[in-house]
Amino acid sequence: MRRYPAVSPSGNRPGSSPSGWADFLPDRTAIEEDAAAPELPVALDMPGKVADFLRATELDDVERAALDQGVTVRRGQGYTLHVTAVPAVQHRLLVRCQPLDGGPGAPAVPAQRKARREYENRVSTLTPSP
């Protein structure tokens, strides 16, 4: 049979906290003010025209993995790629599809420009760009 130490007149066991809850809480550590919280992955729908363009370009390993792990969802005549990645990768993918807007000497296809704008609107709802 296990015996506990006598209870003090205040109702606490010797060595325990006054509320009794501190014994059950994990040890607290100081959190650095400058420490950034890790970014959590965010799922966004990428238009198929943007995904097709990005698959044909040179991408980093992280960006390529995000595209390869995306889930294809059929939408009418085209498709949408459900891409899950941290916001920084989503922003980098958006920057890489900039040529879809056209430029000097490069014609812009209106459907591709619209698809890029839609993806830009979705990415802009995330945290500010790095």
Image (cartoon, rainbow, N blue to C red):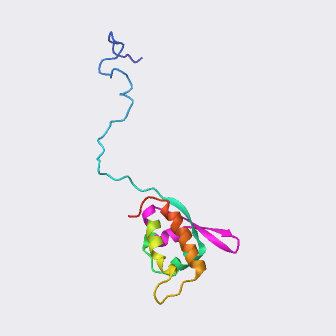
Where does the image place residue 124, in percent across and percent down from the top left?
48, 63
- Could you say which quadrant of the image residue 96 lies in? bottom left
Residue 75: in magenta span: yes
Q: Is residue 17 left or right of residue 98?
A: left
Q: Quadrant of the C terminus?
A: bottom left
**Which residue is drawn at the image coordinates 70% and 75% (left, top)?**
77
Q: Is residue 3 left or right of residue 64?
A: left
Where does the image place residue 3, in percent across and percent down from the top left?
38, 16
**Which residue is drawn at the image coordinates 37% and 52% (left, top)?**
37
**Which residue is drawn at the image coordinates 53% and 64% (left, top)?**
122
Total marks placed = 0
Where does the image place residue 88, in percent across and percent down from the top left?
42, 64
Residue 98: in magenta span: no
Where does the image place residue 87, in percent across and percent down from the top left?
45, 62
Q: Is residue 12 above or below residue 112?
A: above
Residue that extends furthest to the front in the rendered view of this protein: 104
Q: Quadrant of the N terminus?
A: top left
Q: Is residue 59 above or below residue 33?
A: below
Q: Which residues are magenta?
A: 63-88
Residue that extends furthest to the top in the rendered view of this protein: 9
**Which residue is drawn at the image coordinates 54% and 71% (left, top)?**
117
Q: Is residue 84 left or right of residue 128?
A: right
Q: Nearer the viewer, residue 7 or 17?
A: 17
Q: Is residue 91 above or below residue 99?
A: above
Q: Tell me, yes or no, if residue 9 can be seen here.
A: yes
Q: Tell me, yes or no, if residue 51 can be seen here.
A: no
Q: Is residue 95 above or below residue 36?
A: below
Residue that extends furthest to the right in the rendered view of this protein: 76
- Could you say which quadrant of the image residue 83 lies in? bottom right
Q: Nearer the viewer, residue 27 or 55?
A: 55
